[in-house]
Amino acid sequence: MRFLRVILLISLAVSVTACSKFKTYNGPEVTRVVVDKGARKMYLLHHTEVLEHYDVGLGFAPAGHKAQEGDGRTPEGEYLIDRRNPNSSFYLSIGIDYPNEEDVRRAREAGVKPGGDIFIHGRPWKNRKGGQDWTAGCIAVKNSEMRDIYAMVRDGTPITIRP
């Protein structure tokens, strides 16, 4: 009976670990993230070497730089990964420091709010049929890919978002 309990506990521990959304990464440092909006691709780079690449979904109005809150556009330019949310409504997410000073200045001159809360995130079940570009301006990947990205990309990593 004791042997059966030990086997059961080991099986439970292995299954919980296998189902965890948190991974570890011990490979080369991701020194930059590059998003090519036109190609709908995201690249994780170690200097000039592509470590991983992913197909992405963007904001529901993907053309052009995010100009104001609610416009459905994904920002373009140079930013930093500045935070992470392990309890995101969108599976896992890592934050982009949009808006920067230039974005705030442009929005102020236009008399609008620049918006914010731009993330790279997964795709929850409720958005599974949302088409390719369905976010409010974020960058979306598959949940399985988001587990890898969350493990690989550190806060402070530069991100370039190209048209």
Image: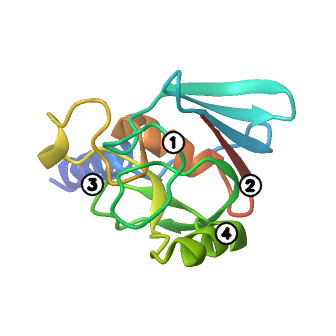
User: What residue is shown with label 2?
Assistant: 157
84 left or right of 137 in image? right
Give the mark, 4 or 3, whose residue is nearer the N terminus: 3
Name the amino acid, label 4: Asn
Q: CA distance from mark 4 to mark 3?
A: 50 Å
* On screen, residue 109 above or below 42: below
User: What residue is shown with label 1?
Assistant: 64
CB atoms of marks 1 and 4 within 8 Å: no
85 left or right of 3 in image? right
Name the residue rendered at 73%, 24% in the picture.
50
Mark nearest the camera among 2 and 4 is 4
Name the amino acid, label 3: Leu
Give the mark, 2 or 1, whose residue is nearer the N terminus: 1
In-front residue for pair 82/87: 82
Give the mark, 1 or 4, whose residue is nearer the N terminus: 1
> Secondary structure under badge 2?
loop
Mark nearest the camera among 4 and 3 is 4
Name the amino acid, label 1: Gly
User: What residue is shown with label 3?
Assistant: 9
> Secondary structure under badge 3?
helix
User: What residue is shown with label 4?
Assistant: 100
Give the mark, 2 or 4, whose residue is nearer the N terminus: 4
Name the residue rendered at 42%, 51% in the picture.
138
Q: CA distance from mark 3 to mark 2?
A: 39 Å
User: Where residue 4 sits in the image (x, y, percent)?
Assistant: 19, 48
